[in-house]
Amino acid sequence: MNYLSIENLSKSFGVRKLFQNISFGIDKGQRVALVARNGTGKSTLMKIISSKDTADSGNVTFRKGIKVGFLDQDPVFDETKTVSETIFQGDTEIISAIKAYEECIANNSDGDAMQAAFEKMDELNAWDYETKIEQILSKFKITKLDQLVGELSGGQKKRLALSKLLVEEPELFILDEPTNHLDFEMIEWLEAHLSKQNVTLLMVTHDRYFLDNICNEIMEMESGNVYSYKGNYAYFLEKKSEREFNEGRETDKARNLMRKELEWIRRMPKARGTKSKSRVDAFYDLEDKAKGKKSEKDLELNVKMSRIGGKILELNKVNKSFENKIILKGFDYTFKTGDRIGIVGKNGVGKTTFLNIITGKDKPDTGDVSVGETIVYGYYSQEGLKINEEKRVIDVVKDIAEVIPLGDGSKMSASQFLLYFQFTPEQQYTFVSKLSGGEKRRLYLLTVLIKNPNFLILDEPTNDLDILTLNTLEEFLTSFGGCLIIVSHDRYFMDKLVDHMFVFEGEGKIKDFPGNYTDYRESLKNLPKSDSVEKVKVAVKEVVINDAVKQVKGKKLSFNEKREFDQLETEIAKLEKEKLDLEFLLSSGNLSTDEIQNKSNRIGVVIDLIDLKTLRWLELDELGSEN
């Protein structure tokens, strides 16, 4: 069943043609990733599909009657509305049914109207809708439903838009960079959520693990055309390499990049069983036969970095807090030549502050930060490029260096360096203001790398970069001989480049973990499950949040509140029974020391939950008696 048809679509900006007469379709059950270089028109195509832009010619047709959900890179909301009002805004069938039911309650409607509203709620299975909303919002760390949307950060607005979309459950998802502004836990939850659903989607993403785990087809936009590959990311790389060689249009460098990428992904544990050895060998045999000789030595760009001395960077008993929030607590580390460290942690735990302390932008409250005399930092921050946008691209690079010395003693011109990072000669003489968002990020990256740093710090470098640029950047960083620190939510990028992790756990605690991100996640699976004090605190906090959420809906009892009132009696009875069981076990004398500790922790939280739920029951009982 066809959900979306694109027929002979064309779009140009002045003399620049983004795409011409492209056609493709999305059928029910297809999960398609759209990949392309920055500036080739991915975002423009997505805007045309979502009616936020118009094509020069061609048609976009959706199947009649299907529900389509769009996620923009930069969602726009009415900033005067609250989060709750925004979520419940819309004309979906479920929301209309809930509003009708609430109106019946508020107006004390007659029996027929109430019965009709009740049956509609039953038909749409809408009784748990508010609970579902709360669960999804909590996954994306949005808990203040009475907060004005105008008070949210850009990242929070993106997460709100994604939450709203997941709640509405459209038949066709159109997603533009859905993993931007999500931390690792959010990305993995979204991955699992979409994998469980029988969804149909078209998305643009640079997150290669997310792409590989969610999509069953990849469409590539290149040179105004669309190429379709029915398979995962490894299959796409293989077939793209074959196509580019057969067409004879690409340089050896581009093919080598794809080949290196394919070799790496096949070494990953996930990929080991997916391709037979004969198929892998056949791919390389085909390439060698077509060339008639062995592949030339792969191109490696090894920029000559500033000399690095014996002393690099030492942090000794470093402490940093903001008001009541602890960022670092007695942190110690001595950096060594060749350190390749990834930094992970939830949003807001202080990762950027840590980088600012390292580079001297912020001062620690106490402790020493000692930087070696030979250290030259290259710091790629999230703030982006701050240059005169009326300059041409080539001039931005030439202002820093017209010639770039390489590690082997040779030199590269500014133009050659730009070409290596996918800036064509035509683009090099384009004004910065004419570049796409991804192209500006790529140019900013160049201005950092070209200064010959020996200590690179990259804070979310993968956002808005296309996959080919990421391949190029990864190759560059693989051969970089200095120290490297990466903060990124791109799991693939981290796995490929780091061999050591700083895990920010909150409250100033930083875990020093030897291994990459996948190693770290695997280690978590082996931890024993227990009712730790932290989990107890989280459980209590979630109850408090849920209670606060209920208050937003006003003082009249909704159906869900009446239903909650009935459920609370059952829940309180179960908790009372658990409390009695725990008391019996604790008094039995048959528990080990660890078991006593765990049971004591658990009985504390059970008592707290009984108190909280009893208060809520009394509150609802009082409100119900007023109606």
Image (spheres, rainbow, N blue to C red):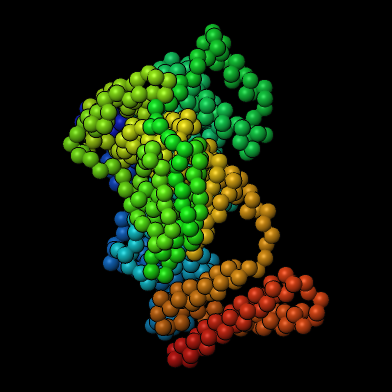
Residue 433 location in percent, x, y? 22, 38
Query: Left or right of 400: which side holds 519?
Result: right
**In the rendered view, would you say 157 is above or below 217?**
below
Task: Inspect this view and state whether residue 8 appears.
Answer: no
Location of residue 429 in the rendering, given as x and y in whole percent from the top left corner: 23, 27
Left or right for 21, reference 491: left
**Which residue is pictured at 19% across the width and 34% down the height?**
391
Q: Quadrant of residue 16?
A: top left
Residue at the (63%, 79%) spot, across then down: 604
In the picture provided, is 293 more to the left or to the right than 204? right
446 vs 578, nearest the viewer: 446
Q: Is residue 325 visible?
A: yes
Measured as percent of width and height from the top left, residue 287 is found at 55, 16
Q: Nearer the viewer, residue 613 or 108?
A: 613
Residue 20: x and y in percent read 32, 28
* Residue positioned most to the left: 390
Residue drawn at x 51%, y 50% is 333
- Which is more toward the observer, 376 or 194? 376
Q: In which quarter of the image is residue 551?
A: bottom left
Residue ID at (38%, 65%): 322
**Is 174 drawn above or below residue 595 in the view shown?**
above
Q: Which of 23 and 331 is in front in this view?
A: 331
